[in-house]
Image: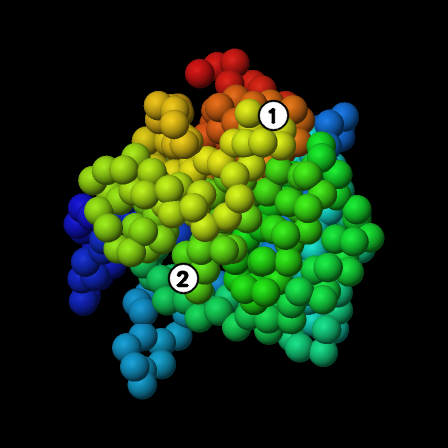
Amino acid sequence: MVATRCTLGAPEVRCRDSGAGGAPGNWGRTGRTPPVIRDNRRMAGGRVLVVGSVNVDLVVAAPRLPVPGQTVTGGDVARYQGGKGGNQATAAARLGATVAFVGAVGADDMGSEARSALAAEGVDIAGVVVTDRPTGVALIVVDPCAENLIVVAPGANGEVHAPHVTAALGRLAPGPRDVVLVCREIPPDGVRAALEIGREAGAITILNPAPADDLDADTLALADVLTPNETELALLVGGGPAGDDPESAARNLLGSRTLAGPRLTDRGPAAREPAVVVTLGAAGALIVRVGGAAVSAPAPTVHPVDTTGAGDTFNGALAAGLADGLDLAGAVHRAVAAAAFSTTRPGAREGMPTRAELEGFLGGT
Ligand code: ADP
């Protein structure tokens, strides 16, 4: 990580560069209204069924981060819609996929906001249960160099257990043309139930293992496609040198998970062959499959202003592409471009492209 200097007056604060796959960027922005969705025509293919978390991010810009016991006066609080599941559902919907979200919020204002924001993107929120725990919140303090302190209070996300997932996905009745996209930040039994149901239905299952802890081999084996970033991949293979050799690390992971569960290659198109797709920040992504050569999907060169939500954009776009009938390489190509595009605007959901924007971007690269 490169050290950069950032002069803030006395005392001088020394900042770390957020780097290519980096830390949240422009958190200090003022509140903004969500962009108008100009192109939300729904695609004719299968659906994207997202199971995961939804949070409200409360962000305060401060002149410096407090040390333990210290109080620092910051600016006005800003609220942003967040949570990996909500973000990924939004990314897929912006690209024209028919999307349903399964998750949980609290019976509070933030829960209503979170549901409204997803509904405004055209996401079916019938699978969002209102619980007696508060809506998930991320409390974020950010300094002028975009270094941050974050505490997440999962709240209602902690209620996304197997019975709720089973009931909600049961109503959605996934089929072989659908994609079930599962992220973490919900209990492991909820993750597992979602993957089991998706797989049972013949849907393509994607697990975004972020964070990568607390995932057993049997759960990993239920995913047709795993989408770790380099850090998560290293954790999944036991802290190995994923950064030096992501292909080998991905092959190790693929080998162990293939052994842990039945092979999926017997039951469908090539898109369902087990794969690990490692996201590599500015370098794009690497597709690794059993028995085949690794395929690189380089990211277009952009001038990133905020990499917050890049991984979520990637996962939502990947699911949208697969639901639209693209093969894995084609879907990853589009996902890499969508995620690169998202880094050129501040904010997580704010940067996610519409389908028309992505087409224009791909046409110009
Ligand atoms: P995460 O955000 O989950 O840590 P990555 O950093 O690997 O994941 O980024 C996810 C995707 O976002 C990448 O595969 C790439 O498509 C895109 N991306 C991230 N950073 C950049 C960048 N600096 N330039 C272009 N694309 C980027």
Three-letter amino acid code at disc 1? Pro
Residue wearing tag 1: 269
Query: What percent of the width, then of the height, locates residue 313?
Result: 52, 40
Closer-to-camera residue (17/325): 325
Closer-to-camera residue (15/40): 40
Q: Is residue 105 left or right of residue 52?
A: right
**Mark number, residue 224:** none
Residue drawn at (62%, 32%) of the image: 267
Asked if residue 195 is positioned above or below residue 251 in the image, the reply reads below
Query: What percent of the width, then of the height, locates residue 321?
Result: 60, 29
Q: Residues within 10 Å of mark 2 (few under 14, many from 20)?
A: few
State if disc 2 and disc 1 touch (CB < 8 Å). no
Query: What percent of the width, then of the height, locates residue 216?
Result: 45, 60
Residue 296 visible in the shown view? no
Closer-to-camera residue (253/348): 253
Asked if residue 296 is positioned above or below residue 342 in the image, the reply reads above
Q: Earlier in the sequence, mark 1 or mark 2?
A: 2
Q: Is residue 227 left or right of residue 49?
A: left
The number of numbered badges drawn on the structure is: 2
Residue wearing tag 2: 213
